[in-house]
């Protein structure tokens, strides 16, 4: 297994996590920033990207895309199961 493939998959997952986090931060008015939650979510997003890249085991550039798409796929499966348009609970 090539370490570059794993690293780029991890980076793809982190990019996906950042996009989701920023989307959530700017979609609502009173969202507090919690550094522990942020770091945990970035690590988990990276881990998902790493695992997906390891499964497909393609070239490094493709692993970045796979790492990004892996998190997106899991998010959409979760939203489908929960029958919710968002991962986050709606505020009153």
Image (spheres, rainbow, N blue to C red):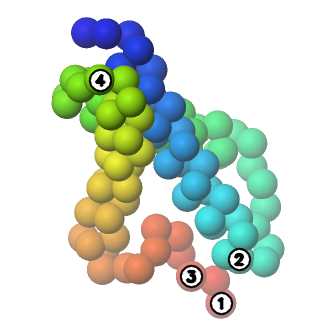
Calculate the distance from the C-alpha at mark 3 to the C-alpha at mark 4. 40 Å
Q: Which residue is mark 4?
A: 59
Q: Which residue was labeled with disc 3? A: 90
Residue 60 location, x and y as percent?
A: 36, 24
78 versus 45 height, above or below = below
The disc placed on residue 11 is: none
**Number of residues whose C-alpha sits closer than 10 Å to that of mark 4, classed few (under 14), some (14–19) or many (20 or more):** some
N-terminal label among 2 and 1: 2
- Residue at image location 29% in from the left, 23% down from the top: 59
**Can you say whether 62 is above or below 6 in the image?**
below
Q: Tell me if mark 1 has few (under 14), some (14-19) or many (20+) residues whose alpha carbon lies within 10 angstroms of its own.
A: few
Whether pointer 2 and pointer 3 mark residues with C-beta atoms closer than 8 Å, the reply is no
- In what quadrant of the picture does the N terminus appear? top left
How far separated are the C-alphas under marks 1 and 3? 7 Å
Left or right: where 15 falls relative to 67: right
Q: Tell me if label 1 and label 3 are in contact, CB under 8 Å.
A: yes
Q: Residue furthest left?
A: 56
Q: Are marks 4 and 1 in contact (CB under 8 Å)?
A: no
For the residue carrying disc 3, how many other residues have a C-alpha within 10 Å: few (<14), some (14-19), or many (20+)? few
Q: Which mark is residue 92?
A: 1
Is 88 rendered above or below residue 40?
below
């Amino acid at each position: 297994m090539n370490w570059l493939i794993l690293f780029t998959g991890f980076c793809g997952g982190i990019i996906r996590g950042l996009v989701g986090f920023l989307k959530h931060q700017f979609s609502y008015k009173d969202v507090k920033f919690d550094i522990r939650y942020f770091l945990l979510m970035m690590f988990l997003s990276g881990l998902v990207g790493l695992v997906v890249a390891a499964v497909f085991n393609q070239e490094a550039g493709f692993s970045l895309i796979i790492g990004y798409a892996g998190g997106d796929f899991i998010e959409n499966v979760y939203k489908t199961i929960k029958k919710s348009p968002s991962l986050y609970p709606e505020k009153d």
